[in-house]
Image (spheres, rainbow, N blue to C red):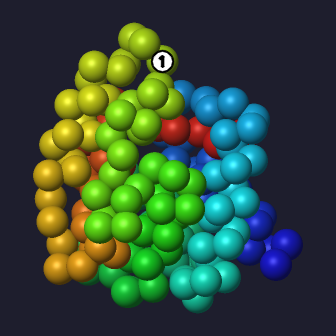
Amino acid sequence: MQRVAILLVVWCVGFISAEKPAVRLDKQKTLDIMQSLIQCVAETNVNPEVLIKMRNGDTFPDKVDSNVQKFVNCAFVKTGYGKKNGHVKGGKIVDLFPDNVKEEMRKVVEKCDSKDGKDPNETTYLFFKCFTEESPVHVVLE
């Protein structure tokens, strides 16, 4: 379990890129999110190595293992940023960001949350893929 936690930290922090400025979340939000991510790895049986491979690029593949989609959906729902139907709580996500990027983030969230997958897991995955590609910043959990 400790290995999974370490891989998740590496995965989350790994979304940092020199190409995009970083937005750091406060420690309590980070702790809450990390606890949810660890639970979701266990619940979905996602291979943490797959998460690391996804993290290594700024784009996500269109086709992924269903456990990856389940993991992403689980993470959003457990952290309170996702709905059971696969869509996200846009206002809550936008509130994570500093005022100087909120309007741009609102547009990204609206654009990315307009996609529907064949089920809630795919819908959340499509949102996360789009959000990762379109966001002008990287979220850093520390």
Left or right of 125 in this view: 114 = left
List x then y, in percent, for residue 52.
56, 68
Q: Residue at image x 34%, y 75%?
A: 121
* Residue 75 vertical placement versus 22 (above, below): below
Query: Front-most of 114 and 51?
Result: 114
Q: Is there any visible trace of residue 131 in the rendered image? A: yes
Q: Nearer the viewer, residue 83 or 135?
A: 83
Residue 39: image quadrant is bottom right
SS for callout 1: loop
Q: Which amino acid does the dot numbered 1 rest on? A: Pro
Q: Quadrant of residue 60?
A: bottom left
Vertically, is 65 above or below 121? below
Number of labelled discs? 1
How crowded pointer 1 is (Cα within 10 Å; few <14, some 14-19, many 20+) is rated as few
For residue 116, which quarter of the picture?
A: bottom left
Please name the residue shown 28% across and 19% down the image.
Answer: 103
Q: Position of residue 73 (x, y in %)?
A: 42, 68
The residue positioned 75% from the left and 35% from the top of the image is 27
Residue for badge 1: 98
| Left or right relative to 105: residue 138 | right
Q: Answer with left or right where residue 52 lies relative to residue 116.
A: right
- Inspect this view and state whether residue 56 appears: no
What quarter of the picture does the C terminus occupy? top right
Measured from the top left, where is residue 21 in percent x and y?
Answer: 47, 26
Q: Residue furthest right?
A: 2
Quarter of the figure that contains the N terminus: bottom right
**In this image, 34 relative to 104: left or right?**
right
Q: Is residue 105 above or below residue 16?
A: above
